Image (cartoon, helix red, strand yellow):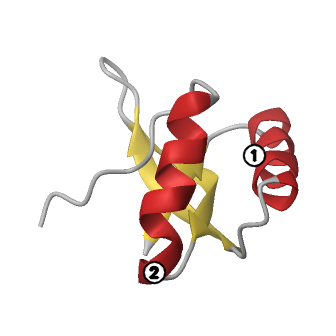
């Protein structure tokens, strides 16, 4: 399940460290997303994925560290 989309390298590296220290197994995939309010454009980001069984624990870890986990809108 998609956990988080990091939009900057510094953010991605910090999140990797947080998940590793929290003992969460994750996968990262570089993919594109659409960003910007006025000038919308396609950008690249680091998409962090965890298993469904780890999603709740990983999302709580993110929230405790002031990250906003991805919410599935489907």
Quarter the C terminus occupies: bottom left
Task: Determine the residue positioned at 63% across, 40% down.
Answer: 7
The N terminus appears in which quarter of the rendering?
bottom left
Please tell me whether residue 14 is drawn above or below residue 73 in the rendered image: above
State how many labels appear.
2
Corner quadrant of residue 37: top left
Q: Quick one: SS at disc 2? A: helix
Q: Nearer the viewer, residue 71 or 30?
A: 71
Which is more foreground, mark 1 or mark 2? 2
Q: Which residue is mark 1?
A: 15
Q: Residue furthest top?
A: 38
Image side of residue 46 versus residue 63, left or right: right
- Give the residue number, with chain letter if any, for mark 2: 53
Most foreground residue, 31 or 52:
52
Query: Few, some or many C-alpha atoms within 10 Å of disc 1 (few <14, some 14-19, many ≥20)?
Result: some
* 57 in relation to 55, above or below: above
């Amino acid at each position: 399940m998609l956990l988080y989309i990091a939009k900057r390298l510094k953010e991605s590296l910090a999140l990797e460290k947080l998940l590793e220290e929290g003992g969460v197994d994750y996968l990262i995939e570089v993919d594109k997303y659409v960003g910007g309010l006025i000038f919308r454009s396609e950008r690249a980001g680091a998409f962090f994925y965890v298993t469904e069984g780890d999603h709740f624990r990983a999302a709580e870890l993110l929230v405790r560290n002031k990250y906003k986990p991805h919410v599935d809108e489907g």
